[in-house]
Amino acid sequence: MNDLQPVRGTRDLIGEDFRRHAHVIDTARRITATYGFDEWATPIFEDTRVFSRTLGDTSDVVTKEMYSFTDRGGDSLTLRPEGTAGVCRALVTGGLTQSLPQKVFYNGPMFRYERPQKGRYRQFHQIGAELIGPAEPLADAEVIACGWDILVALGISDDTVLELNTLGDKESRDAYRTALVAYFTDHSDKLSEESLSRLERNPMRILDSKDHGDRALVANAPTIMPYLTEAAAAFYAKLQDHLARIGVPFVENPRIVRGLDYYSHTAFEFVTNALGAQGTVMAGGRYDGLVEEMGGPPTPAVGWAAGIERLSMLLQATPGVVAPVVVIPIGDTAEAAAVDAVQSLRRAGIRAEIGYRGNLKRRMERANKLGARAAVIIGETEDSRGVAQVKNLATGEQIEVALADLATHLA
Ligand code: ATP
Ligand code: MG
C-alpha cells in the first residue's frame, strides 16, 4: 500500500500542525463574535455557476484553478475555490436578503488547482468575514478592523502591513479602464501573453499579474486616483478617517485590485515579508454587485478571507495541550477503582488517562512521556481504604487523597 501518498497540494493536519490551525480558527471565531458576526457553514461543493457567474470569466480562479466535475446525475459541480460566493448564494436561496444586515463568519477548506509551494496548496483553508447590507464606509472600516484585531490576537500584527486601495464606483472604473487600455496598448509589445488577452476583457486584472515583465510595466501604469468620481473619492477618504480613528495602521497601494472580479470601492490586503512570494495573508474588499449576480436584489457587502496555513506559519508559538492526569492501578484488584477514578475526573472536565498495561515503573514512564501533571496511584491497600496516592509530577510531592475528593483536589 506504500504507493499511496497524499494528493499533491494537500496536507494532513496532525499534532502541532492541527493545533496551530485550530488556534487560528478559535481566535477568529472569538474576535468576529465581538463584532457581532455569526458563524455559517455552507457546502464545500456548489453548482459550478455559483462561481463561474460571479468570480468573473477572466479571473485566474475560474480560468485555471477550479476543481469542477460532472456528478452521477449529470450536474456540473465545483469544489469551492473561495467562500464569498457560497455565502451570497446561501443568503439568496435562504431568503435572507430582506433580513439585513447579515454578519457572517466562516471557515473551512477551499480548493484550487495551483502549483503547490510554500503557503500555496490545492486544498487550503480560509477564515472569512462578510458584512452584507450596509453601503457605508464604516462597514468597510469595521470589517478591516476586525481582521486586524485577529492578527493582533494571533500575535502577528507586527509582521503584517495593511495595504489599502479603492476601485471606485462604476463610473470611476470605466474612466480608469480607458486610461489603462491606452497605457498598456502603448506597451503591448512588452506584455505577457496572458495580460494581452486581459487587455480587452479586463485590463485592471493586469495590475494583479505575477509575470515579472508585466510587473515592471504595472509599476508605471496610471493609478485610479485621478479618475475617481467625487462620491468615490469621498467614500475612500471617509474609510481612511474611520481606520485612523479606530487605530488600524495602513499604507495606500494603488496596485491592489484583488484576484476576483466582483469588487468595487475598497480593496485591501494584509501583507507580510515573512512568507516569501506568498505574502498576502488576508485579503478582501467591497463587492456590491455579487448578491445581484447571484439572483438577489442589489445588495452592498464587504468582507475578507485569510489563508489559515499562512497565518499558522506566522504564529510565534504552538499552542500546547493540557497536561493530563494519569491514573495508575497497581495489581488486578485496583483496576476497577482506577477505572472509576479516571471516569470521575473526566466527568469533572479534567483531562485524564489510564494506562492499559504494565507495572508501576512502565506506567510512570508513560505518564512522564505524556507530560502528565499528576499521577494517581491506587494499590490494593489504597483501594480497600478508598484513597489514592497523588503524586505531583512537577514537584515530586506525594499526598494521600480520598477517592471521593480526587476531582476537587486535581481541578
Ligand atoms: P494569491 O495572490 O496568493 O494567489 P489570491 O488573490 O488568489 O492570493 P484570495 O482569493 O484573495 O487569494 O484568497 C484570500 C487568501 O487565501 C489569500 O490571501 C491567501 O492567504 C489564501 N490563499 C489563496 N490561495 C491559496 C492557496 N492556494 N493556498 C494557501 N492559501 C491560499
Ligand atoms: Mg491565487
Image: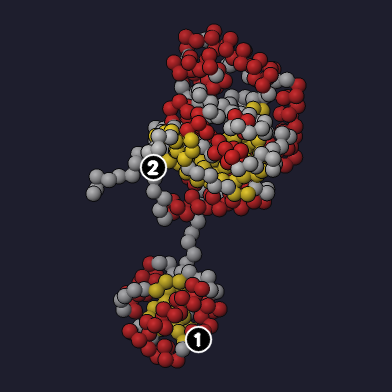
Q: Quadrant of residue 264?
A: top right
Within 10 angstroms of label 1, few (less than 14), some, or many (20 or more) residues? some
Taking depth in this image into account, of 92 and 307 the one nearest to the observer is 92
Q: Mark 1 or mark 2, which is nearer the start of the sequence?
A: 2
Q: Which mark is residue 10?
A: 2
Report if the beta carbon of the residue with label 1 is closer than 8 angstroms to ligand 1.
no
Q: Residue at x 75, y 40 (%)?
A: 245
Task: Tell me where residue 272 appears, x and y as whole percent.
Answer: 54, 37
Q: Residues within 10 Å of mark 2 (few under 14, many from 20)?
A: some
Under circle 2, the secondary element is loop
Q: Residue at x 34, y 41 (%)?
A: 7
Residue at (66, 32) in percent of width and height: 297
Q: Amino acid at mark 1?
A: Ala
Quarter occupied by residue 204: top right
Q: Is residue 135 visible to the viewer in this orientation of the structure?
A: yes
- Of 186 and 73, nearer the camera is 73
Foreground of the two, 239 or 259: 259
Q: Amino acid at mark 2?
A: Thr
Q: State which quadrant residue 359 falls in.
A: bottom left
- Name the disc covering residue 402, or none: 1
Report whether residue 137 is seen. no
Q: Is mark 2 within 8 Å of ligand 1?
A: no
